Amino acid sequence: MKMVVFAHTPPPLHGQSYMVELLLKGFGGDWRNRPARPGSSPGILENAPIQCFHVNARFSGGLEDVGLFRFGKVLSLLKYCLEAIACRFRYGIDTFYYIPAPPKRIAFYRDCLVLLLCRPFFRYVVFHWQASGLGYWLERDASSGEQWMARRLLGFPDLSITLATSLSADANYLLSKRTGVTPNAIADPCPAFEQSTLPYRLERLARRREILAKKTEPIGQGERYEVLFLAHCTREKGLFDLLQAIAQANQLLNERRCALGMHVTVAGAFLDEGERQEFETWRSAHADEVEYAGFLAGEAKNRLLQKSDCFCLPTYYSAEAQPVSIVEAMAFGLTVVATRWRGIPELLPKDYAWLTTGHDPEAIAEALLRSVDADLAGELRRRYGEMFTEERYVDSLTKSLQAITLPEAKEVAGDS
């Protein structure tokens, strides 16, 4: 199979662009939009079951530009479509790989235009659903004309790859001929987990349990339980619910005269100026409870994950699917407190007890307090190793993509 990957790699860095990078790395895709000579890297692997040719369709210069209309984006779109079509004829490519938009009107029209221009030239179309909620938006909020456009231009893809079994609604709405399941994944960011990270986690857990057993010293004289929020800093991602939860949890710990305090480090970019100002006001009033680290990547992000005790993402974001940040947290053995939202429960072990409802600071505070003496580092790290490594990701994608030429079936092989 030869496939044009019409999607961008970082920058900007977010879950979707990282997964495209991982796909290209796994299949030997050449980022210069042409097959490389044997032995060169990166390039097309001559004996690879799937050969990828990349059109780096980057429409936004940064996170603040995502979802906004600019005339220059239209020109870029036309250029990228021409690249894909030229690549199709030059190398005899039969498959067009595309990541549909989240439920936003401007992004939806972009998708329609791309598929209008490119789809007629390819035998197969693959949608990789990295966001969720498009089908719901089309059914409830879109006009009859937009619904017609969706069916006409995006409907009946040959394969839809979803991140979890529970996230198939968009594929079903567009009447996908086949559906495969491939969870998000990451290259192992913590290869020395057993040697250094796990002993560190167990040492801190033992210290917290000792403090909780005493229950005598007032807050402020003991240790801090380090909570991490790593995501876009928005209300829907649960940032302000988490801030309220931290304050409530600390109040309860203080009333119990416990020598343990909750502290949250917020890492990520603000997309709305009003929300940034609201956060700064809260931080000024709760300086001992909140720290802002800004947008982090690479080693800086890994260091923060290493030193944290708990990862909290109380999201109810409308386009949420399966946050890569939770996979990162599991790789570092962090206790995860999150919401029962979209594909999150399928990321975590069955009957995971630290999931809450969205937009409920009191429930989040209760879950954080219960997580203080939870021994989950080894279990969550094993879950990462079994389900969310880059090797598992490439293997699962290969199974799903190879099934595209089989007789039509509703579900194909993949990981759930």
Image (cartoon, rainbow, N blue to C red):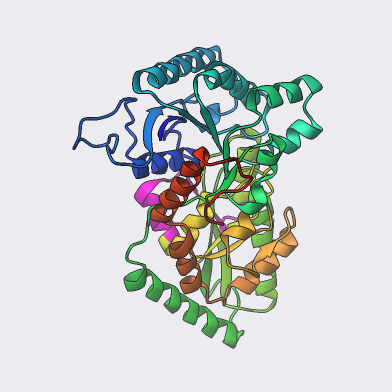
Horizontal and vertical percent position of residue 366: 70, 68
How many numbered discs sit on the rendered protein?
0
Q: Is residue 281 above or below residue 360?
A: above
Is residue 266 among the parts visible in the rendering? no
- Among all residues in the image, which is located at the extreme front? 407
Occupied quadrant, residue 209: bottom right
Specify the quadrant that holds the N terminus.
Answer: top left
Q: Is residue 301 highlighted in magenta?
A: yes
Q: Is residue 275 above or below residue 118?
A: below
Q: Which segment is the magenta one?
A: 284-305
Specify the quadrant that holds the C terminus.
Answer: bottom right
For the residue pair 78 and 360, the one nearer the viewer reads as 78
Occupied quadrant, residue 263: bottom right
Q: Is residue 208 above or below residue 399?
A: below
Occupied quadrant, residue 100: top right
Horizontal and vertical percent position of residue 73: 52, 17
Q: Is residue 79 left or right of residue 221?
A: left
Is residue 331 among the parts visible in the rendering? yes
Horizontal and vertical percent position of residue 173: 72, 37
For the residue pair 146 and 364, the one nearer the viewer reads as 146
Q: Is residue 323 above or below residue 72?
A: below
Q: Is residue 356 highlighted in magenta?
A: no
